[in-house]
Image (spheres, rainbow, N blue to C red):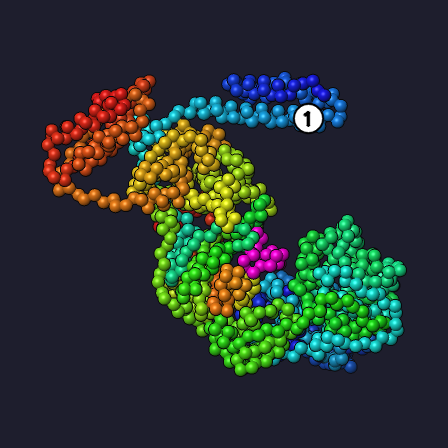
Amino acid sequence: MSTIDVQGVLQGLLQQVAASDTPREVLKAPEFKQMYGAIAILPAEERGAFGREVNQVKVTVEQAVEARENELESADVVALDVTAPWSVNGTKPQLLPTNQGTQHPLTKELDNVIDIFTRMGFDAIESRQIDDDHHMFGTLNFPEDHPARDGYDTFRTEEGFIPPAHTSTMQHRILKDGKAQLEAGGHIAAISYGRVFRNEDVDATHEHTFYQVEGVYVSKTANLGQMLGTLRSFFETYYGQTLRIKTQPAYFPFVEPGLEFAIEKPAAIGGKTGDWLEMLGCGMIHPNVLREAGIDPTQYRGFAWGGGVERLVMLKYGIEDLRHFEAGKLAFLRKFKS
Amino acid sequence: MIISVNWLKKFTSIDMPVEQLATLIGERLVEIEGIENIGEKYQNVIVAKVVECAPIEGTDHLNATKIDDGGVAEGVERDENGLVQVVCGAPNVRAGMMVAWLPPQSTVPETFHDAEPFVLSVRPLRGVNSNGMLASAKELDLFDDHTGILEVDKDCAPGSKFAEVYELNDYLLDIENKSLTHRPDAFGVIGFAREVAGIQGKPFTTPDWLHDIAPQFSPVQNLEVPTVHIEDPALSDRFTAIVLSGINETAQSPVQLQTYLARSGVRPISASVDVSNYLMLLTGQPSHTYDYDKFKALAGDDFSIRVRSARFEEKLTLLDGKEITLDQADIVIAAGNEAVGLAGAMGGANTIVDETTKNVLLEVATFDLYHLRSTQMRHGIFSEAITRFTKGVPASLAMPVLAEAVRQLTEFTGASVSSDIIEDYPGVREQITVNINEQHINETLGTHFSANDIAELLQNVGFEVAFNELDATVRVPYWREDIHIPEDIIEEVGRLAGFDTINLTLPRREFSATKPQPFDALRSQVRALLVRAGANEVLTYSFVHGDMLKKAGQNPDDAYRIVNSISPDLQYYRQSLTPNLLNLVHPNRKAGYDEFAIFECNKAHRKSAGQTEENVPVEFDSIALVIAKAKAKGDAFYDAKHYLEYVADVLGLTLRYEPLSDGDATAAPFEPARSAAIFDAKSDSYLGVVGEYKKSVQKGFKLPDFTAGFEINPRALHEAVQNVGQRYQALSRYPGTERDITFQTPSDVTFQTIINEATNALTDTNFITTVVPLGIYQAEGSDEKNSTVRIKLVSYNKTLTNEEVTAVIDSVIARVVEATKGRVI
């Protein structure tokens, strides 16, 4: 056993720190040298434990030094009368020039999208930013370990929560919440919008953080023709012109049939005949997804779709790099005056 | 995945131009990413016969040949017999051989797409004129083959067009295969062709051999066969094998077969390997061959094929010479106790087929796709075979493919069958049957198909459909194990007929527009107000580096941690928005912006907030703003507060500011002596924090001295706004009066005290009253300060007299002076 009273030394050092105006000096105290020196002369089997104890002292003192430094710094801080309207001997503050203010182009576009869908009778619900496997996959007909899950490149937290990789993470909630209305002879019509996350490297065309809008419609008579009609109607309103659409078979576990939906690029954004833009994925809600929410798939049918918001914004303004959206550069943001 | 259109045409007719075909496939099956025309580079290649072949003196390898091109090439010099002289350096050139001739003026196909394509001419070589050249498979851009010039192995007359002989007037389709994950059948040319027929509305005839799920063989010589044991049915549905003898491992497969492999991106090697690859490309079913004698020797007393999980720390050297340590989730093929292959991925080096091989064991099997998927990721093996296995190859396919492989190996390599078929087949499945009715299909799609239409669409691609009135029983072919429920059938009908042929409608329903949720509307209003006040909205990441939390004085232990992030910048969920905004101040300052306010409306998360009823973390809505002025002096606090007051004023709220005591994570970056907790005065509810930042925070984020901001809870703000009620006060018909009063008080009297006392004194006057701050003055070194307010009084009933005004003002003065121990100056 070492003869050094490590805890005693620690208390002494902490007292020095608390009393000092230059607490960092305490880190050079001879006590440290003595303690580290003592490690070498201990029997090998005791060195580990003693070394750890000494290191812990060092860390504790360092933290105390930092805290004391902050305290000393804050001691110079002059308190304010927080109830006053402005500084002593000062004048009334001014707001920055109003023509300098800008709304983020993504939230602005999201507002547009939400506005159109609410006018079409869809409730708008913001999507969660942290969720669980049950809502993200389980209730959406993704079996455990299914390869389709891989395509979503989800992040996970220590606890197993998931930053949602699609706004469909709200679909099960929307269906459950709308069940009563449905069974009372109504229908479910809602969009969920918000931030989603994929574990991807970032470059001009890839982001780990982006925005989506998902739509859900359920009634006794919903069908694929209605889905395509609804989507075309949305895009025609959004672009203010008639549009041609086309579809392509696709596979998403939570719809059956599943489709990719494209529009002919509108003239407003420089489109020509035969230029197609893939806008979203869609399909008839899989009976398992309805059943999971307690809705009888033999009585009711639904359709759902989901697509990205960045795409709309980039096309509208000709934005070249996806990374601008979350970069917080005023040089970018101030281009979107309205 | 690359698919040759000519190969498809062997199984179904295609009459439309290739662009139209690609569009149709895109609309009804899968996206086509590109079309390549390979025929154009073969237009001038001619099949010729070498009639004479003689070494050129003084060279060690050149031959002067005379070739017969059937007289088709124009403008070339010919001898008296009409033959053309070509010099050739290939070792395999000989008289009587049929070759591919590139005449003068033709372009070497290999260089066709080069910047400077190589165009042939008449060129003397060692004094002998060569008219063009005899081409190798490499020069023809078919495949790598270094043995010499290509020998045309099909029956054809000299002068035939090479492209026609080998079906090279072809287009290659580049298929986006990600969206075919659930369609193992479409990973074979036959399955793809079946779909191409179906989407054209044509019936497809599946080749007989593919339908024959129980073929018979008569062995020539009976070798001892191993037993087959799938030790766990979860690993494999079926393992079939057969022993073949007398395979000539150096035999080459027909050139035609090799060109189809090459077109699909697979290198031809030898007939025995080519047959396996060819059948895989054709059907989606991979196969593997082991050296039978090596296998038997390794098996020893236990001559068995075992399909089992790998053992702990088990090692295996693969065909490519790499030794790997297996995981217990890997599936292994073992000869008795000895691992001889990583199932579905790669064979072992210890049973490799080589020139010494006399007998082979041919394996055609299926393996559990989930196991193979993990094997693929773990060992980084992305072969054509495992790609197909991980889509889920149906067990029924094994036998027809085994039979066809045997037939082709017999034909191309001289092999003979030396055993009966051996197999273990624990995964036998009933044929899938789905019941559906015509109404269900039409109502879901919004279509008007007749029962006949539906039956025809499905029968075209191999479903058996029996309608009884409007109810149908659909029997699903074995290659479509992805079909289980009526909705799957509905998708097939819609897709095969074309979703784009469906009439578009809107849902018929009671129509009413919905209103945005009140909370969302309030948030939009605050956002618009801040924009109007010259601030810029930003969006920043929800995830932050641990260092950023520490710099902001927040405790990472309270942050949800991301465990699989690709970047340390995305380590934790943020606990509030302010740190992200502070992080943007310095870069924007460096970019030349001296004065700005940035804000964000978003969400934050903390573990300590607990979980909702659904057992997911509680989410906070938040609005944060930071204002920074690089060159300004004074107390930034009041600028931030001014923004807040501006918003509150529009919303009709009166805010109260109290010293910031011990704060939560939101308050952590704020300096308590220069910050305030914000309350709604009416409801007393806490709204957030406004203030300047701690010195350590200023240093950590390199903030200008003049930086401050706020972070508020918009949910609490929303609650407060609900209680605002009627704000309009009727106007008076009488003029009002203003009086300015300056109070000199001890410097520690807060401004709010003066305002409060004045306001209280005015409460009982029955006048419309307002108290407005005008100025705060304190001489340097003084411990007293002067606070000036303007008091406005208006009566509803009359014009106030001087005496009445003075009486009210005196009461205000008396009350303020008493409360503040000050005086009026």
Circle 1 packing at 10 Å, graded few (<14), some (14-19), many (20+), is: some
Dot 1 falls on which chain?
A
The one nearer the camera, B349 or B162, is: B349
Q: For mark 1, give the secondary structure.
A: helix
Q: Position of residue B564 (x, y in %)?
A: 60, 46
Q: Check disc 1 and give the amino acid type.
A: Gly
Q: Is residue A143 magenta?
A: yes
The one nearer the camera, B411 or A87, is: A87
Whether B154 is drawn above or below B609: the answer is below
Rendered residue at 76%/76% (across/down): B215
Q: Quadrant of residue B721?
A: top left
Magenta region, residue range: A137-154
Secondary structure mostly seen in the magenta stretch: loop
Rendered residue at 54%/59% (across/down): A140
Q: Visible in this render: residue B584?
A: no
Residue linked to disc 1: A51
Rendered residue at 51%/23% (across/down): A68
Q: Position of residue B60 (x, y in %)?
A: 84, 64
Q: Is residue A171 magenta?
A: no
Q: Quadrant of residue A89?
A: top left
The one nearer the camera, B495 or B9, is: B495
Q: Quadrant of residue B667?
A: top left
